[in-house]
Image (tube, rainbow, N blue to C red):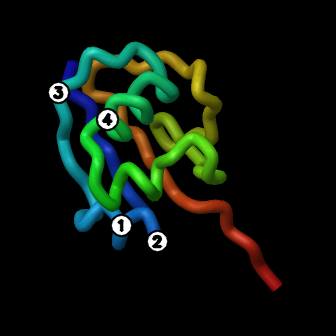
Amino acid sequence: MKVTIRYFASMREAMGTSSEVLETQALTLGALRSELLARGGAGAEALDTNRSVRMALNQVMSGPDAALTEGCEVAFFPPVTGG
């Protein structure tokens, strides 16, 4: 299935792009993250499962078990702190 992936803040810098359309076999957000990790490179370090990464599916904060659907939008971003 095709999904649109958006990267924000330091994730965008690490991935070298703000978005991409990806053909994936992943069925969940967690599986998609693992698929992206398998590509290696600086982006893999940013998405490492030992790092705190927030995920959203169709603009709703979601966990790794959230099911992907054809044409969905996924967003990855680092935790945000404020002051």
Tag 3 residue = 23
Tag 1 residue = 14
Tags 1 and 4 in contact by the CB under 8 Å rule?
Answer: no
Tags 3 and 1 in contact by the CB under 8 Å rule?
Answer: no
Tags 1 and 2 in contact by the CB under 8 Å rule?
Answer: yes
Q: Residues within 10 Å of mark 1 (few under 14, many from 20)?
A: some
Whichever of labels 3 and 2 marks the residue nearer the N terminus, that label is: 2
Could you tell me which secondary element the residue under label 2 belongs to? helix
Q: How far apart are marks 1 and 4 (CA)?
A: 15 Å
Tag 2 residue = 10
Could you tell me which secondary element the residue under label 4 belongs to? helix
Could you tell me which secondary element the residue under label 3 belongs to? strand
Q: How crowded is mark 2: few (under 14 residues within 10 Å), some or many (20 or more)?
A: few
Is residue 74 toward the left or the right of residue 16 in the image?
A: right
Tell me the residue at 58%/27% (across/down).
64
Tell me the residue at 24%/64% (across/down).
17
Q: Which amino acid does label 2 sit on?
A: Ser
Q: Where is residue 12 in the image (x, y as percent from the top left)?
A: 36, 66
Q: Indicate whether 66 appears above or below 35.
A: above
Tag 4 residue = 38
Q: Indicate whether 41 appears above or below 14.
A: above
Disc number placed over residue 34 in the picture, else none: none
Q: Quadrant of residue 80?
A: bottom right
Of 58 and 5, nearer the camera is 5
Whichever of labels 2 and 4 marks the residue nearer the N terminus, that label is: 2
- Label 1 or label 4, whichever lies nearer to me, is 4
